[in-house]
Image (cartoon, rainbow, N blue to C red):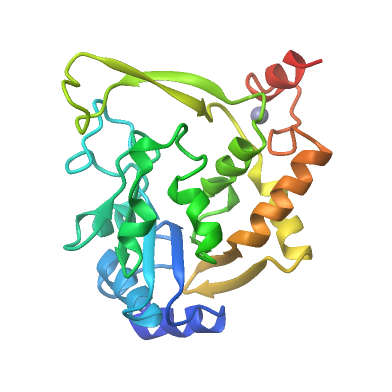
Amino acid sequence: MRKVTKEQIQTSLKLMGIEKGDVIFMHSALSAPGIVEGGADGVIDAFLDVIGDEGTLAVSTLAFGAPFDADTTPSAVGLISETLRKRKGAIRSLRPVHAIAALGKRAKELTEGHEHCSSNCGEGSPYRKLIDMNGKIILFGVDMNRNTTLHAIEDWMDASFLEDYTIMMPTYMPDYQGKTMVLKKYPPGHRDFLRFTPVLRKEGALIEGRVGLAKVLCIDVKKMYELGIREMKRDPFFFLCENPACKFCAKKRKAVQ
Ligand SMILES: [Zn+2]
């Protein structure tokens, strides 16, 4: 099979409307397009070239190791994420579980203060800042279920199925050893985010493209929040699945009846 080149990735991104100065938040699977020239670095470089020096490229670096250490705890969500996290100049936000990493002009602005937020995906978090930055979410070879920022909409709406979650204190806090902390409005359990894809498509909040064998989605963050809030106002359990046998979703629906 032919390798997917950096030029091919760039052409696809431009066709999807990605341009100089964009703030991108990406979820990805390196294996999805086929074999990419330059591997994870090749994908990252392709994005950086298209968005230029004025642009910002951020990735989810979900991490479940405890205690969380922003410098050493690896990203659990793939090689592109882990490679960007380790790049020179990348900044990782200080937050257990939902930390992000960013490169580029607004990386500092996007990541700073995450440790002071009252919840992982709530006010002041990078997930919320993406709105004012006119951010775009890229799902690179992964589907809507990987779209972490939808938990920020659940947080915004104060969804009944979010829970307090006790974890080991992260290493950036003083005297963290052996201590725990509580993460408020943590999003546990199961979701059906896939049902949101046609809503975004219908309302013009989604551009679909392709890189090699991979489907790539580009989502307008501001519109995504508006539509997610609209759907949750109509149905507070919109993001949960409807399988009556689902241990999480069925139980959470029942809890408020
Ligand atoms: Zn479910």
Report ligand 1 position as a quadrant. top right
Left or right of 173 in this view: 189:
right
Q: Residue at x 37, y 65 (%)?
A: 57
* Foreground residue among 194 and 48: 48
Would you identify the image quadrant in which residue 117 lies?
A: top left
**In front: 165, or 33?**
165
Q: Specify the quadrant that holds the C terminus.
A: top right
Is 109 drawn above or below residue 10 in the view shown? Answer: above
Q: Quadrant of the N terminus?
A: bottom left
Q: Is residue 207 left or right of residue 106?
A: right
Q: Which of the two residues, 174 or 32, is positioned nearer the viewer here?
A: 174
Confirm whether residue 30 shows in the render: no
Q: Looking at the image, which residue is at 47% across and 81% down? A: 19
- What residue is shown at x 35% (from left), y 81% (from top)? 52
Q: Position of residue 170 (x, y in %)?
A: 25, 28
Depicted 24 relative to depicted 12: above or below = above
- Residue 31 placement (x, y as % from top left): 38, 60
The correct choice, above or below, for 206 with respect to 150 in the image is below
The answer to whether 59 appears left or right of 92 in the picture is right
Residue 236 seen by the camera: yes
Query: Along the horizontal axis of the image, is 240 left or right of 175?
Result: right
Q: Position of residue 125 (x, y in %)?
A: 45, 45
